């Protein structure tokens, strides 16, 4: 009877181990499938991140080129402003010189008129 009970227990043990292995395999397969889904999801997310990074790099390169163009335009405008300022200063200087000359001429002419008037007065007094 003990032998029969031992054989029965051994049979149950083999069935338990088989069932346990089967359960472990199923759980392992489920975990592997979930890990596979997570890997695929992470790879898709990584691909999207790479795509966005490439897009941002292109935008940054375009922005840098735009900035360089604007800096060149600013430099050209500053040079043009300096040239126009020099020309304007030259015109103002020339005009100021001309006006001073006219003022001298007018003062000279006023002095000549005053001298002539004084001479007439002096002659009239004589």
Image (cartoon, rainbow, N blue to C red):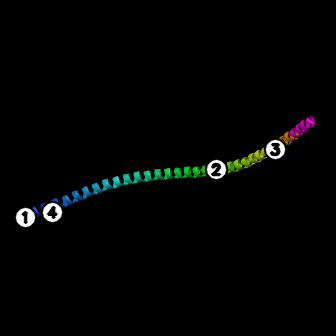
Tell me the SS state at disc 3: helix
**Where residue 56 is drawn, which disc sits there?**
none
Could you tell me what secondary structure mostly forms the magenta stretch?
Answer: helix
Write the residue at 35% across / 55% down. Answer: 35
Tell me the SS state at disc 4: helix
Q: Nearer the viewer, residue 32 or 19?
A: 32
Quadrant location, the N terminus: bottom left
Q: Distance between the residues labelled 2 and 3?
A: 43 Å
Residue of label 3: 98
Query: Pointer 3: residues within 10 angstroms few (<14), some, or many (20+)?
Result: few
Write the residue at 80% across / 46% down. Answer: 97
Q: Distance between the residues labelled 1 and 3?
A: 139 Å
Instruction: Judge from the rendering whether residue 111 lies leftward or rightward of residue 71; answer left or right.
Output: right
Residue 49 sits above or below residue 99 on the image: below
Q: Where is residue 125 in the image (x, y as percent from the top left)?
A: 91, 35
Residue of label 2: 69
Q: Nearer the viewer, residue 108 or 124?
A: 124
Q: Which of marks 4 and 3 is in front?
A: 3
Q: What stretch is highlighted in magenta?
A: 113-126
Whichever of callouts 1 and 2 sits on the residue coming sooner in the sequence is 1
Residue of label 1: 2
Query: Pointer 2: residues within 10 angstroms few (<14), some, or many (20+)?
Result: few
Residue of label 4: 10
Q: Nearer the viewer, residue 37 or 78?
A: 78
Write the residue at 81% across / 42% down. Answer: 103
Q: Nearer the viewer, residue 46 or 123?
A: 123
Query: Pointer 4: residues within 10 angstroms few (<14), some, or many (20+)?
Result: few
């Amino acid at each position: 009877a003990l032998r029969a009970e031992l054989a029965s227990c051994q049979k149950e043990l083999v069935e338990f181990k088989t069932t346990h292995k089967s359960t472990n395999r199923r759980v392992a397969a489920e975990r592997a499938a979930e890990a596979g889904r997570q890997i695929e999801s992470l790879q898709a997310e990584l691909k999207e991140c790479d795509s966005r990074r490439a897009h941002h790099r292109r935008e940054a390169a375009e922005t840098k080129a735009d900035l360089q163009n604007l800096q060149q335009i600013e430099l050209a405008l500053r040079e043009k402003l300096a040239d126009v300022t020099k020309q304007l200063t030259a015109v103002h200087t020339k005009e100021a010189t001309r006006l001073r000359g006219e003022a001298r001429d007018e003062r000279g002419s006023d002095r000549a008129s005053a001298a002539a008037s004084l001479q007439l007065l002096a002659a009239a007094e004589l």
